Image: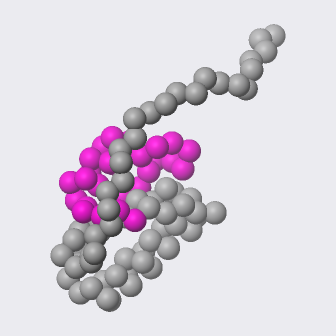
C-alpha cells in the first residue's frame, strides 16, 4: 500500500497584467470564453444577443475550454487573441 500526501508544492506562474478597460465596445471584437459549466453557454449566448441589439454590427467570437477543471489550452487562447479585442469570461454553477 502506498500512502500519498494531499499536500503539494506551490508552483508560481508568470501572469499577464490586466489591461485597462476600453471606454466603449463599438468597433471592437468581443470574445466569449465558456468554461463548460452549466448554464454558462446560455448566459453567454444571452449576453451576445443583448450586445448585438445594443451595438448593431458588433463582431463576436465564441470559444470553449475542453473541461471546467483545466485552464484553456494555448490553442484556445491563441484563437481568442486572434479574434477578439476584449473578452467576457464566465463561470457557472
Q: Is residue 32 left or right of residue 71?
A: left
The percent coordinates of residue 16 (x first, y second) are: 35, 44
**Residue 37 position within the rendered picture, expressed as x and y whole percent measured from the top left:** 56, 59
Residue 40 appears left or right of 21? right
In front of the other: 35 or 13:
13
Image quarter hosting the C terminus: bottom right
- Nearer to the camera, 29 or 64: 29
Expressed as whole percent of the image width and height from the top left, the position of residue 54 reads 32, 88
> Which residue lies at the image location 30% right of the left edge and 83% below the top edge?
52
Q: Does residue 51 show up?
A: yes
Q: How many marks?
A: 0
Does the magenta portion include 80?
yes
Foreground: 89 or 1?
89
Q: Is residue 42 left or right of residue 49?
A: right
**Corner quadrant of residue 34:** bottom left
- Can you name the residue that lies furthest to the right here? 1
Query: Residues in magenta?
Result: 63-88
Amino acid at each position: 500500500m502506498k500512502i500519498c500526501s494531499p499536500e503539494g508544492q506551490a508552483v508560481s506562474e508568470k501572469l499577464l497584467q490586466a489591461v485597462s478597460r476600453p471606454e466603449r465596445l463599438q468597433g471592437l471584437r468581443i470574445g466569449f470564453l465558456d468554461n463548460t459549466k452549466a448554464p454558462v453557454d446560455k448566459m453567454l449566448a444571452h449576453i451576445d444577443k443583448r450586445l448585438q441589439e445594443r451595438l448593431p454590427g458588433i463582431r463576436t467570437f465564441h470559444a470553449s475550454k475542453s473541461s471546467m477543471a483545466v485552464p484553456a489550452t494555448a490553442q484556445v487562447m491563441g484563437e481568442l487573441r486572434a479574434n477578439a479585442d476584449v473578452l467576457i469570461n464566465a463561470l457557472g454553477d
